[in-house]
Image (cartoon, grey):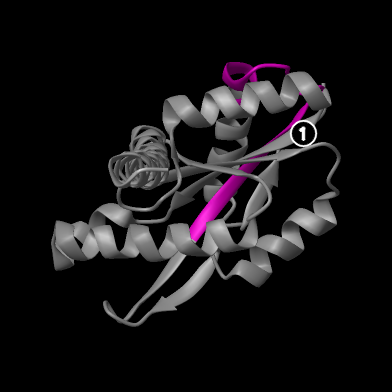
Amino acid sequence: MTTVQLIEFILIALDAVIFCFLTIYLAIKLRRERRAADKRIKILEKEARCDYLTGALMRKAFISEMESSLAAEGEGTLLVFDINGFKAVNDMFGHPEGDGVIKRYAAKLLKAFDKDIVGRLGCDDFAVFIPGKCSREDINARIKKSGAARFSDKPTQLVITSCCGAAVAPQNGNTFDDLYAKADKALFNSKKNDSTISYCREE
């Protein structure tokens, strides 16, 4: 092999090595960029589905997940929660502190029902859907353990209480609208009777 041929061989080999390194570098870079893009998409999807303040599902997303779960399971329990006298919290302390109460209240529900579907339907209105069978005793115990029904809110120095109405599928209905109407009626009875939770009668 002549000197010229040797130099040409070395140059070709160097080109091949550089090409391989560039290919690997671009592949790694593209993979990282794809992971970052996927992560951003997941964040955006979560922001589109979840309430920014509490992290619970927004109404539309909650209904969608609940009805999908109900279609798959064929049964479940819808719980509707409402904070008692919440308007007074806003009037006394202002909306920023009211938002704080909402956030702290939601955290209790999310922790107590971490394997279920939790949503924020409105201002201080929350809903939980428990797929499948769940006894009243278990539901009552979980609400009591969560502290959502009654807790001392340190920032406001208030005792925050809430009520809950429950409706069971398929006895009380097979859609969100049917179950919500029954659970909301049970919620009214809960407030009226000053009880933690009221169940809609089976039909």
- Is 139 located above or below residue 1 in the figure? below
In this view, 144 is above or below 201: below
Does residue 140 appear in this view? yes
Say if residue 50 shows up in the picture: no
Q: Residue beneath label 1, please?
A: 76
Q: Quadrant of the N terminus?
A: top left
Residue at the extreme front: 2
In the image, 18 versus 79, the foreground residue is 18
State the residue in front, 156 or 26.
Answer: 26
Residue positioned 66% across, 68% down in the render: 144
Residue 163 spot, x, y in % from top left: 54, 53
What residue appears at the point 61 percent right and 58 percent down from the top-left corner? 196
In this picture, residue 110 sits left or right of residue 19: right
Rendering quarter of residue 35? top left
Secondary structure beneath label 1: strand
Q: Position of residue 138 (x, y in %)?
A: 81, 57
**21 w.r.t. 72: above or below:** below
Q: Categorize mark 1 by other alpha carbons within 10 Å: few (<14), some (14-19), many (20+).
A: many
8 sits to left or right of 81: left
Residue 4 horizontal/vertical position (percent):
28, 41
Q: Position of residue 19 (x, y in %)?
A: 35, 39
The residue drawn where x is 27% and y is 77% is: 156
In this view, the residue in front, 70 or 36, is 36
* Residue type, numbered disc 1: Gly
Choose top left, top right, bottom left or bottom right for residue 142.
Answer: bottom right
Which residue is at a point 24% across and 60% down the rendered structure image?
Answer: 98
Where does the magenta region start and end? 162-180
Residue 166 falls left or right of residue 184: right
Q: Quadrant of the C terminus?
A: top right
Q: Is residue 86 magenta?
A: no
Q: Nearer the viewer, residue 126 or 26?
A: 26
**Does residue 169 lie above or below 20 as drawn?**
above
